[in-house]
Amino acid sequence: MRSVMLSVAILCALTDASVAQQPSSAPDFEAASIKVNTTGNPSWSISYTPDSLRATNATLSALIQSAYGIREDRLAGGPSWVRTTRYNVNGKAAHALPREQLRLMAQRLLENRFGVVLTREQRKGEVYALRLARRDGRLGPDLRRAADDCLGAAAAGGLPGNEPARPALKSSTGAAPTYSGRCTTMTGLSMGLSRSLGVEIVDQTGLQGRWDFVLACTALAPSVAVEPEQTNLPTVFAAVEEQLGLTLARTPRGSIEYVVIAAAHAPTEN
């Protein structure tokens, strides 16, 4: 069975990333290069090592999504070339840094070299609210509070250490997990479900802190084929209620936040 796992530490950090333009306190990369890629290859990649950013054949739109943690369908505006022109971008830091620090440096690079300015905009659309399912606040068997130190060194801005492998999360249903995550906030869980389902989901649970969760349900995305062993599993809506003790309530005319590219220009290559 296909299993979807949250990259929790990164996802939660990106959730809080400041998008409305504010002066960045992150240092610049020690060395950075930007070149147009004219290969015509449709594939692209953006990756981080402990001391560098490397993007190959990536559009400015993809670079913005990666640096700021923005969903593709929630990024609007900008000239047409930001989604068509491809770039090779390399940034090298003076020494190893936490991943989120490198992302802040990537934001500063995009602001300085591409003149990127982003703003927020609210638009009307269908929204689902993630709420407690029971009046007494009792949670389901597959939503458990995470350990206080679950983020480890990352919580203090340090580099991830070689931590011992933790046991795989298991579903109370006995089925293999379809979707699971560790050390996530409820906002992180909402964002993960939102990405998978393709709908806007906002956290209204009131639950604070970090959580581990497991969902055993039918395929989250309509484009994913349902495997034979999934046919007897509940839908994601039923599983969220039965297994997590939460509910997804539909609001046809909710407010959806978009990030808008207010300004951008072609960079000077080097």
Image (cartoon, rainbow, N blue to C red):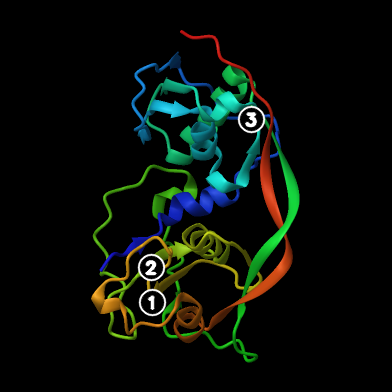
Q: Quadrant of residue 86?
A: top left
Q: CA distance from mark 2 to mark 3?
A: 35 Å
The residue that mark 1 highlights is 217
The quadrant of the picture occupied by the N terminus is bottom left
Q: Label 3: few (<14), some or many (≥20) within 10 Å? A: few
Q: Position of residue 8 (x, y in %)?
A: 44, 57
**Are the two marked residues, 2 and 3, in contact with CB atoms closer than 8 angstroms?**
no
| The label number, if any, that marks residue 179 in the structure image | 2
**Are the two marked residues, 2 and 1, in contact with CB atoms closer than 8 angstroms?**
yes
Q: Position of residue 79 (x, y in %)?
A: 64, 26
Q: Label 2: few (<14), some or many (≥20) within 10 Å? A: many
Q: Amino acid at mark 3?
A: Ser
Name the secondary structure under disc 1.
Answer: loop
Q: Is residue 251 above or below residue 162?
A: below
Q: Is residue 210 above or below residue 105?
A: below
The residue that mark 3 highlights is 24
Of the two numbered discs 2 and 1 in the rendering, the one whose residue sits closer to the viewer: 1
Q: Is residue 220 above or below residue 57?
A: below
Q: Position of residue 161 (x, y in %)?
A: 31, 48
Q: Is residue 78 above or below residue 129?
A: above
